[in-house]
Image (tube, grey):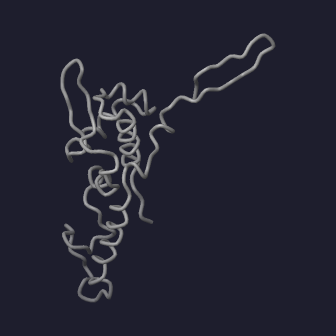
Amino acid sequence: MLRLNRLTDYAIVVLGALAYRRGDVMPTAQLATLTGLNQPTVAKVAKLLQAEGLLETRRGASGGYRLLAAPQDISLVDIVEAVEGPIAVNGCVDGAQDPCAVSNCCFMSNHWNKVNGAVRSALEDVSLSDLVDPAALFTPRVHTTTSSSSTDHRIGN
């Protein structure tokens, strides 16, 4: 099974929160509150995304992170590779660190690059804006409860 790790999911959530804030600089504490993730996780994810050029960081009292590109210009490949490294469906694709032990007799050895390219292409076609609707994810829901004397409008999850 091809499976992305949990940090990749968290990266999408953090990027979605920043997309929702449309270019604002946000500290990790504020991102943690907005996303429901813990602050050390947000900091770890933000550093990975910043190292790969998806976020910029500003230091100081009004510092934090902000998106460097529009959500529609950030592909799922960008996010996955920022968190997990290069996409490779197995160890036999070009650039693999460990040579395959059965490459001399494997009928798939010449085809894995094609499969890997197809997966990569599919992920390139999905943008951050396709993955999340930040307005729906981060807008508080209003719950209405009625009592005998009045209607109570509370913001909650």
Q: Residue at x 40, y 48 (%)?
A: 129
Residue 44 visible: yes
- Residue 29, image x, y percentages: 35, 25
Q: Quadrant of the N terminus?
A: bottom left
Q: Is residue 139 above or below residue 116?
A: above
Residue 48 visible: no
**Dividing the picture into quarters, in which one does residue 55 lie?**
top left
Q: Residue at x 26, y 32 (%)?
A: 65
Q: How many marks?
A: 0
Q: Residue at x 41, y 47 (%)?
A: 9
Q: Is residue 142 above or below residue 120?
A: above
- Residue 113, image x, y percentages: 27, 76
Does residue 79 appear to the left or right of 59 in the view shown? right
Which one is nearer the viewer's eye here, 55 or 133?
133
Q: Is residue 120 above or below residue 10?
A: below
Q: Is residue 80 above or below residue 157?
A: below
Q: Quadrant of the C terminus?
A: top right
- Residue 148, image x, y percentages: 81, 13
Q: Residue at x 31, y 71 (%)?
A: 116
Does residue 89 appear to the left or right of 137 in the view shown? left
Q: Residue furthest right?
A: 148
**Dividing the picture into quarters, in which one does residue 4 lie?**
bottom left
